[in-house]
Image (cartoon, rainbow, N blue to C red):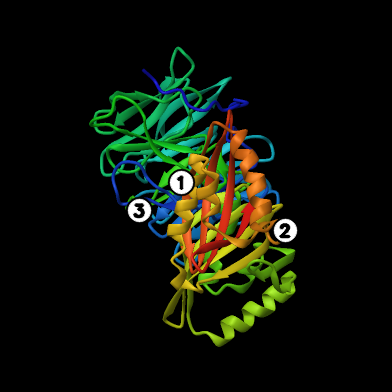
């Protein structure tokens, strides 16, 4: 049975602009482990509001793609080692698409869309491609292609209202039509003598075939899922495609269908289309639409620039009126300018600094990270509460690792069991006489054991189906931070509770709901 993937809404027309108009090119490292990939980080290397697509690796350290250059599409060359982008070609009055290296040469081939609407395949010479490009095959309307070597090219060309697959011999200057109704995804198979291509089947979906370049025979491999047109080869036997925000793979030796590989939905992307793998199979480039990032993704994005000591990259993740405080609500400073000044002074007085996330709790726009911080070779733990609004961190609250002698987890666990048993006496026995309940950061809702008991006694009596499940827990100093899923009769709610323990009793609870 075929897997049915997230449907794409394509306006399918012939030509190189088919697909999304607001796409970016992303890079990720290919995990070394087999099975399901757990991808935690992805890099947007284009970051343009317009069309960026059609990636192809020039080598293991450089990537080509069709990039938005002030409203025009040109050949972008991205250096993975220096994280820099440059424009490879001299801009023309039209635009360049589908750039890729021509094997056995130092040249690049790309489709140029001229202002008169013609699409031609051009060759760009040299390290910069700034010399005048030359048309590779006169008069041929090329839409998509892959070069087998510096003499032979497999291409989908425009023919009336369809695409036809042709094999071009540049040396003999011949064009052989192999089939009608071909697709746009054409690739050289790594480490072999084959090219792969797609053809539209009777159901309107795309089948993948291998073309043996020695015998010129084609062999059916598999069908792409409904609505999918793009794939790439990771190695000689493994293909990868994207659907929605997920990746799937197909092993030509063992699979009968496309298998789940990775879920990238937490990385703020959607609608993956074209893909490309580096020659060594260690990097994957993919084209996708940027999605509204999650609160966790926004918080995550400030960690790398901090570790790189990139002050502006770090500061730009925060809102203009950011509040920085010590838990619960001691304001240290406010505003982005003050944040910049404080961290500039921090970088100036420290030789090395690094932060890594040990554990993370997320509830809507609140992210709580347990962090290991290394400063000048010395490490310590801290917990930071981040509040996110409109794509920026609007507050950052530090909890320091103090009063560890309290060993707070046991008493918090005891009160949890009593809560689930709805045993009001055992529950209240875990709390101090002067217990205070707050809403984050410091809005007082209940003060004193008697007031708390009265509230919870009625709640327990009215709630026969009551259960709290701890989904995640962070313990730091005298504090226990619990991510809680609470069943209340027929409903559920999520909450975060920060318990503070003093003298063996819970003295304060701060809720985030």
Residue 480: image location, x then y, percent: 50, 60
Task: Give neighbour class at mark 1: few <14, some 14-19, many 20+ (Cα, 10 Å).
Answer: some
Q: Which residue is mark 2?
A: 444
Q: Determine whether, in the image, residue 462 is placed left or right of residue 279.
A: right
Q: Residues within 10 Å of mark 2 (few under 14, many from 20)?
A: few
Q: Residue 317, labelled with which disc?
A: none
Residue 14: x and y in percent read 58, 27
Residue 391 image point, x, y percent: 67, 53
Residue 397 vertical placement versus 235 (above, below): below
Q: Nearer the viewer, mark 1 or mark 3?
A: 1
Of all residues, the one furthest to the top in this rendering is 202
Q: Position of residue 348 (x, y in %)?
A: 58, 85
The residue pinned by badge 1 equals 417
Q: Please name which of the two marks, 2 or 3, marks the residue nearer to the observer.
A: 2
Residue neighbourhood size for the residue with mark 3, other residues' Cα within 10 Å, grouped as few (<14), some (14–19), many (≥20): some
Residue 320 visible here: yes
């Amino acid at each position: 049975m075929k897997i049915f993937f997230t449907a794409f809404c394509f306006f399918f027309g012939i030509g190189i602009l088919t697909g999304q108009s607001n796409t970016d090119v992303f890079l990720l490292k290919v995990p070394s482990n087999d099975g399901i990939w757990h991808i935690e980080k992805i890099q947007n290397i284009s970051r343009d509001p317009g069309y960026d697509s059609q990636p192809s690796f020039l080598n293991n350290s450089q990537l080509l793609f069709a990039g938005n250059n002030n409203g025009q599409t040109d050949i972008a060359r991205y250096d993975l080692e220096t994280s820099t982008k440059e424009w490879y070609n001299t801009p023309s009055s039209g635009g360049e698409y589908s750039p890729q290296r021509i094997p056995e040469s130092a040249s690049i081939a790309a489709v140029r869309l001229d202002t008169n609407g013609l699409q031609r395949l051009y060759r760009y010479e040299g390290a910069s491609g700034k010399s005048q490009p030359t048309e590779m095959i006169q008069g041929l309307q090329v839409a998509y292609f892959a070069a087998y070597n510096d003499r032979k090219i497999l291409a989908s060309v425009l023919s009336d209202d369809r695409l036809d697959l042709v094999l071009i011999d540049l040396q003999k200057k011949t064009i052989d039509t192999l089939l009608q109704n071909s697709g746009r995804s054409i690739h050289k198979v790594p480490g072999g003598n084959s090219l792969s291509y797609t053809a539209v089947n009777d159901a309107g979906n795309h089948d993948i075939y291998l073309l043996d370049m020695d015998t010129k025979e084609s062999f059916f491999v598999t069908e792409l899922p409904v609505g999918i047109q793009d794939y790439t080869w990771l190695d000689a036997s493994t293909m990868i495609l994207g659907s929605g925000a997920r990746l799937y793979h197909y092993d030509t030796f063992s699979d009968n269908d496309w298998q789940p590989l990775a879920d990238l939905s937490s990385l703020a992307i959607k609608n993956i289309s074209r893909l490309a793998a580096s020659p060594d199979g260690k990097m994957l480039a993919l084209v996708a639409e940027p999605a509204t990032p999650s609160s966790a993704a926004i918080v995550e994005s400030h960690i790398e620039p901090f570790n790189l000591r990139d002050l502006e990259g770090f500061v730009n993740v925060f809102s203009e009126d950011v509040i920085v405080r010590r838990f619960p609500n001691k304001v240290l400073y406010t505003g982005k300018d003050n944040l910049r000044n404080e961290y500039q002074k921090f970088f100036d007085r420290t030789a090395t600094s690094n932060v890594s996330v040990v554990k993370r709790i997320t509830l809507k726009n609140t992210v709580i990270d347990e962090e290991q911080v290394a400063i000048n070779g010395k490490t310590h733990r801290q917990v930071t509460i981040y509040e996110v609004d409109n794509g920026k961190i609007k507050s950052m609250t530090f909890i320091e690792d103090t009063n560890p002698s309290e060993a707070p987890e046991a008493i918090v666990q005891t009160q949890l069991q009593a809560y689930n048993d709805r045993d009001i006496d055992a529950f209240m026995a875990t709390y101090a006489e002067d217990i205070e309940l707050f809403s984050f950061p410091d809005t007082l809702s209940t003060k004193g054991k008697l007031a708390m008991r009265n509230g919870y006694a009625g709640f327990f009596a009215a709630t026969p189906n009551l259960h709290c499940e701890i989904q995640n827990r962070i313990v730091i100093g005298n504090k226990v931070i619990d991510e809680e899923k609470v069943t209340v009769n027929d409903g559920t709610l999520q909450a975060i509770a920060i318990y503070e323990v003093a003298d063996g009793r819970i003295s304060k609870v701060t809720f985030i709901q």
